[in-house]
Image (cartoon, helix red, strand yellow):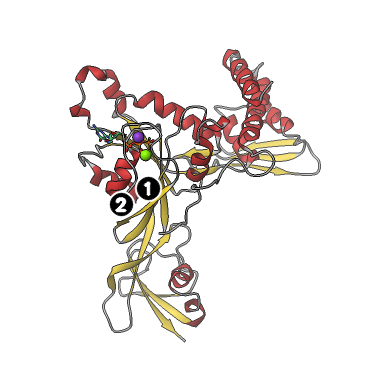
Amino acid sequence: MTTVQKIKEIEDEMAKTQKNKATSYHLGQLKAKLAKLRRELITPQGGGGGGGGIGFDVARTGIASVGFVGFPSVGKSTLMSKLTGTHSEVSAIDFTTLTTVPGTVKVHGAPIQILDLPGIIEGANDGRGRGRQVIAVARTCNLIFIVLDVLKPLGDKKSIEGELEGFGIRLNKKPPAVIVRKKDKGGIAITNTVPLTNIDHDEIKAICSEYKINNADVAIRQPNATADDVVDVIEGNRVYIPAIYVLNKDISHVQIDAISIEEIDLLYKIPNSVPISSSVWLNVDELIEKMWEALDLVRVYTKPRGLPPDYSSPVVLRKGKSTVEDFCSSIHKEIAKQMKYAIVWGSSAKHSRGQKVGLDHILEDEDVVHIAKK
Ligand SMILES: Nc1nc2c(ncn2[C@@H]2O[C@H](COP(=O)(O)OP(=O)(O)OP(=O)(O)O)[C@@H](O)[C@H]2O)c(=O)[nH]1
Ligand SMILES: [K+]
Ligand SMILES: [Mg+2]
């Protein structure tokens, strides 16, 4: 039996197993088995394969990158070309784009790299089409645009999410507040600071056992934690990436009977979605604004001594990597060593007249910084 067949068999069994006290151990086991098979599927066998590949690894520029993922001919290249001014082939024929095509767009002074990618098809994970390479690139992005054709959005949305999830990408989700700490003895000790609503102790024990973890402290701190969350924590190679659903092609231009009212209704209820038309440039400004918010970047303005701050070219940092030291190193690697102290104005400062801070001070968006040298 191939891995794909084994996965199918487990999925079928899970579908026909009702979740209750008597079956939860069995279901936990199946969840863990499934995760292990999926990992097998995406791990390249022998030399190479899997991710990367000619034309897929492009030089990374800018402070953050946004990858375009979608079925063929949904308008990814049309959007990317217009957004960045970089040429990426557009045509009505599917699979026009064959490699990663990089471009850059400047948003609020920050250069953002845009990666146009080939269209993917269902089964991308199992090695169909160039799906694997595409998803491997998406895994390294700071934001994913899931581009959907407004005429068939819901089915496509589900299968693209399935492909990305199968590759260990978790969309619009925080890492689960679940800790599994292995020990030498004592069995599986489960503690929870929140009530367990979606998972019980048997299920957790089954998952651990499937991963041959016999002794561990398992702490559940997340409300509504699921068996999938526990599996994700044990597997450990998940990436958590924000996603925006781009509903492309102008809905007012399509024949009204091509899409049902119910479907339009559901469409506008998709969280994190923006309806646009890339060909007639409709609502793209809103998309750019959503992109900016999702990237969660920190702009810092430099203030030279005795001069006003330079608002024209911010130093752009990432949330979680925005200390004064990060600020210094992104200008020049020697600056942190030469710094005596820094003065900060803005939301991270305690008072409006400026606060004297050290290298570990965390900066916030639109702060102004003066570096005083030794
Ligand atoms: N009506 C309409 N057509 C569009 C829009 N955006 C793109 N198209 C058309 O859709 C077709 C496919 O566009 P592409 O930009 O090549 O699509 P893609 O997603 O990059 O396709 P692949 O690279 O093959 O995956 C082209 O004929 C475009 O002119 C839109 O907003 N409205
Ligand atoms: K196309
Ligand atoms: Mg294309």
For residue 340, side relative to residue 112 (left or right): right
Identify which residue, 193 or 22, lies in the foreground: 22
Relative to residue 180, is residue 153 depicted above or below? Answer: above
Above or below — where is 253 with respect to 331? above
Question: Residue at the bottom extreme?
Answer: 374
Q: Quadrant of residue 269?
A: top left
Which numbered disc, 2 or 1, marks the residue that appears first in the sequence? 2
Q: Is residue 195 visible?
A: no
Residue matched to label 2: 84
Q: Quadrant of the N terminus?
A: top right
- Dot 2 crowding, Cα within 10 Å, few <14, some 14–19, many 20+: some
Residue occupying image coordinates x 30% and y 27%: 267
Q: Tell me which residue sits at (71%, 37%) in the image.
A: 189
Q: Which residue is mark 1?
A: 294
* Residue type, mark 1 in image: Ala
In-front residue for pair 66/308: 66
Q: Position of residue 111 (x, y in %)?
A: 35, 59
Label 1 element class:
helix
Instruction: Kindly report the distance in space between the C-alpha atoms of the residues bearing marks 2 and 1.
Output: 18 Å
Q: Quadrant of ligand 1?
A: top left
Neighbor class of circle 1 (other Cα within 10 Å; few <14, some 14-19, many 20+) is: some
Q: Amino acid at mark 2?
A: Thr
